[in-house]
């Protein structure tokens, strides 16, 4: 086994630059899609269900793209073809979404947009693990976080800035304001150009070179116990079906069907694995899920609580701030649109703070290690979300976003640095895709449970969703202490 060469600052810059555009698209989606849905007539209770497109597409797309990219080698390399295909499709979706004439078309375009961004994003995570030695991986993922922060600052603030310079910020009922429309057009162009820069300005190691540099333990080759998988699948199928029946029988919140459906789908996946070819993509992905490294299992719990909190923030901040701080829940009112634009500024702020935190994170890691750095950062994020309950001047919410920014930068970098040391090079893509199950599943759980919890226990107040998110971030920090701190080898 040989050690990978150390890359220069500008080589790492070029390989991460595409994340500027990827997060530009994500930031426009996160800050504006709830606004578009409400503008097109969605009720508060329906918003989490409409948002299910985002996590569900990630659940399906990322492990498949990871599996395929592990087995790809073309003139463009191993990961870069997926960067380019995803960027083209995401750009087209960004151009189309603000022109949606109906709610169902907007929801469908969210599926297309999120799937396309995932096609590009998942190989970018594996790309850092492919190219960098262990000693540089935390810095590489932090560089990605830096570009995520910079892209998101500009994207999130665009509608606010356009309104400041006189672009129309309101529209007729059922129409999307020009501020949002032009922001999406600009975002599509930025996404395509930045990903194109990374495709043109980087190179990739061929598979045989990656194998020679690999220092992670070999992936286990145990055969999946098909009989056991079927038994477990039947149990999950029955539990999910019983949950769906309980929702129907007792008239529970219909969003709980999402959680029941998730259990049913997992049960069916375990049952089907015994009926398909053992060397097929589906069986291989389920087998790798079954045999994922022990540290990855511990990190899955950390990811669950982190991303549950983030999803709560993304889908409820607009409703919470416009209702509490601007006194309006009417999407056609000037007060609502002023508050929605301010949420864009808040989202820009936490991403700007994340860009600064990304510069500090490698220093933190060198001083106190990966685990304690992550604990501190997500703890700051949890306190930031909880402070929404106490602050009434919306301008002071910028201080809340300082903590969220540190958490966001850390969530986007340190769990991947903790994971990549345990993942073999020949399966870096598929394991990174499987790891994203634990980003997607908490979002599906949040989409299923948050509306029910708010309606049942919190009087339908969206601000309480942010409180739940704050507690969840703090729990995720406690869970990271169970994860082994990797030994850093000299490059």
Image (tube, grey):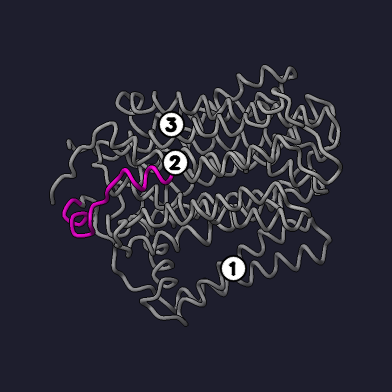
Residue range in magenta is: 194-213
On the rendered image, what quadrant is the C terminus found in?
A: top left
Q: From the top left corner, tell me how far across and down residue 28 is, in percent.
A: 61, 40
Q: From the top left corner, tell me how far across and down residue 10 is, in percent.
A: 29, 32
Of the image marks 1 and 2, the number of the one nearer the N terminus: 2
Of the image marks 3 and 2, the number of the one nearer the N terminus: 3
In space, the residues marked 3 and 2 are separated at their CA atoms by: 14 Å
Asked whether residue 446 is drawn in magenta, I would say no
Give the numbered dot on residue 194. 2
**Secondary structure beneath label 3:** helix
Asked which quadrant contains residue 249, the reply is bottom right
Q: From the top left corner, tell me how far across and down residue 156 is, in percent.
A: 61, 32
Which mark is nearer the camera, 1 or 2? 2
| Residue 456 in view here | no
**Secondary structure beneath label 2:** helix
Give the numbered dot on residue 146. 3
Q: Is residue 335 above or below residue 260?
A: above
Q: In this rendering, would 147 be left or right of 343?
A: left
Q: Residues within 10 Å of mark 1 (few under 14, many from 20)?
A: some
Which mark is nearer the camera, 1 or 3? 3
Prevailing secondary structure class for the magenta stretch in the rendered image:
helix
In space, the residues marked 1 and 3 are separated at their CA atoms by: 36 Å
Give the numbered dot on residue 265. 1
Q: 182 or 461: nearer the eye?
A: 182
**Secondary structure beneath label 1:** helix
Q: Residues within 10 Å of mark 3 (few under 14, many from 20)?
A: many
- Residue at image coords 53%, 30%: 351
Q: In this rendering, would 337 be left or right of 302?
A: right
Of the image marks 1 and 3, the number of the one nearer the N terminus: 3
| Residue 430 in view here | yes
In space, the residues marked 1 and 2 are separated at their CA atoms by: 36 Å
């Amino acid at each position: 086994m040989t050690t990978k060469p150390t890359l220069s600052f500008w080589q790492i810059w070029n390989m991460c630059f595409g994340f500027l555009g990827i997060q530009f698209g994500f930031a426009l989606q996160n800050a504006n899609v709830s606004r578009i849905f409400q503008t097109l007539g969605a009720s508060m209770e329906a918003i989490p269900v409409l948002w299910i497109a985002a996590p569900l597409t990630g659940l399906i797309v990322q492990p498949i793209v990871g599996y395929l990219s592990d087995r790809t080698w073309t003139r463009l390399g191993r990961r870069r073809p997926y960067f380019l295909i995803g960027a083209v499709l995401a750009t087209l979706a960004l151009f189309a979404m603000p022109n949606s004439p109906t709610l169902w078309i907007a929801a469908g375009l969210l599926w297309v947009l999120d799937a396309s961004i995932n096609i590009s994003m998942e190989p970018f995570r594996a790309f850092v693990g492919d190219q960098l030695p262990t000693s540089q991986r935390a810095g590489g993922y932090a560089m990605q976080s830096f570009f995520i922060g910079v892209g998101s600052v500009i994207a999130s603030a665009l509608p606010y800035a356009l309104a400041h310079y006189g672009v129309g910020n309101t529209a007729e009922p059922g129409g999307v304001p020009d501020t949002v429309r032009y922001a999406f057009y600009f975002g599509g162009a930025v996404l395509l150009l930045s990903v194109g820069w990374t495709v043109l300005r980087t190179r990739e190691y061929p598979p045989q070179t990656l194998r020679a540099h690999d220092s992670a333990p070999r992936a286990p080759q145990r055969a999946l116990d098909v009989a056991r998988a079927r038994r477990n699948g039947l149990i999950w199928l029955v539990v999910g079906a019983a949950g769906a029946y309980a929702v129907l029988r007792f008239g529970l919140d219909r969003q709980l069907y999402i959680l029941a459906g998730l259990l049913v789908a997992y049960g069916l996946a375990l049952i089907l694995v015994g009926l398909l070819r053992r060397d097929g993509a589906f069986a291989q992905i389920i087998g790798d899920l079954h045999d994922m490294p022990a540290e990855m299992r511990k990190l899955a719990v950390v990811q669950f609580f982190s991303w549950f909190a983030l999803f709560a923030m993304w889908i409820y901040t607009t409703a919470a701030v416009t209702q509490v701080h601007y006194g309006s829940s009417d999407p056609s009112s000037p007060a609502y649109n002023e508050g929605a634009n301010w949420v864009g500024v808040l989202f820009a702020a936490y991403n700007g703070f994340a860009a600064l935190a990304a510069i500090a994170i490698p220093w933190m890691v060198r001083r106190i290690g990966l685990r304690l750095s992550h604990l501190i950062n997500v703890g700051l994020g949890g306190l930031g979300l909880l402070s929404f309950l106490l602050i009434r001047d919306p301008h002071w919410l910028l201080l809340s976003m300082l903590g969220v920014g540190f958490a966001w930068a850390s969530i986007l970098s340190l769990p991947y640095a903790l994971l990549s040391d345990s993942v073999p090079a020949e399966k870096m893509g598929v394991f990174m895709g499987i790891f994203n199950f634990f980003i997607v599943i908490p979002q599906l759980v949040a989409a299923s449970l948050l509306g029910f919890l708010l309606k049942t226990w919190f009087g339908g107040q969206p601000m309480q969703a942010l409180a739940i998110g704050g507690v969840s971030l703090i729990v995720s920090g406690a869970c990271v202490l169970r994860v082994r701190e990797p030994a850093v080898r000299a490059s």
